[in-house]
Image (cartoon, rainbow, N blue to C red):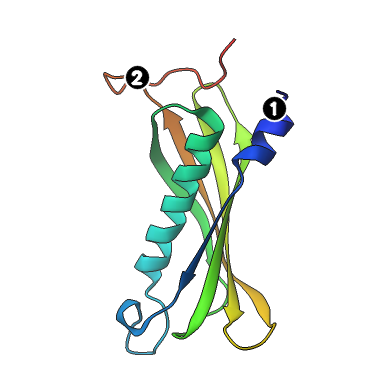
Amino acid sequence: MTLEEKILKAETRIFKAVFPSTTNHYDTLFGGTALYHMDEVAFIAATRFSRQKMVTVSSDKIDFKKPIPAGTIIELIGSVIHVGNTSLKVKVEIFIEQMYDERREKAITGEFTFVAIDDEKNPISIIKD
């Protein structure tokens, strides 16, 4: 399988409903809850790509473009965008969907870097021969 095929196969999509228990006093999704979901989908995409133990080492370029109101559906999409020797980077986008019409818009984007580790938690190569 080529690198491009592995990247496409690793794309991960998760849908969630935004309930009041996950929102702040403005009735929008807590930023920390959004980051939690983003790291989770990024971890799954990284693991699906590498099929190795992966740990988050950084998150960056997190852009909160739109608030995510309670009573909406969100789709999180994680895509591998860079592969190094021991690390890879996953871009995560969150889209807001209204429950009762077709409107959809991008709310948050971010990038997460993961490192493959062995049983002693030392970095190891992602690409296997």
The disc label shown at residue 129, or none: none
Q: Give the residue number, with chain letter if any, for mark 1.
A: 3
Dot 1: within a 10 Å radius of its alpha carbon, few (fewer than 14), some, or many (20 or more) residues?
few
Dot 2: within a 10 Å radius of its alpha carbon, few (fewer than 14), some, or many (20 or more) residues?
few
In the rendered structure, the answer to whether residue 98 lies left or right of residue 30 reads right
Looking at the image, which residue is at 35% across and 19% down?
Answer: 118
Q: Amino acid at mark 2?
A: Asp
Looking at the image, which residue is at 52% across and 36% down?
Answer: 48
The one nearer the camera, 61 or 35, is: 35
Looking at the image, which residue is at 60% across and 30% down?
Answer: 83
| Picture quadrant where residue 119 is located | top left
Picture layout, residue 122 above or below residue 47: above
The one nearer the camera, 57 or 36, is: 36
In the rendered structure, the answer to whether residue 79 lies left or right of residue 18 reads right
Disc 1 secondary structure class: helix
Q: Is residue 68 something one can see in this rendering?
A: no
In the rendered structure, the answer to whether residue 120 lies left or right of residue 114 reads left
Q: Give the residue number, with chain letter if any, for mark 2.
A: 118
Looking at the image, which residue is at 48% across and 40% down?
Answer: 113
Image x and y of residue 82, in percent: 62, 36
Image x and y of residue 123, in percent: 39, 21
The one nearer the camera, 91 or 6, is: 6
Disc 2 secondary structure class: loop
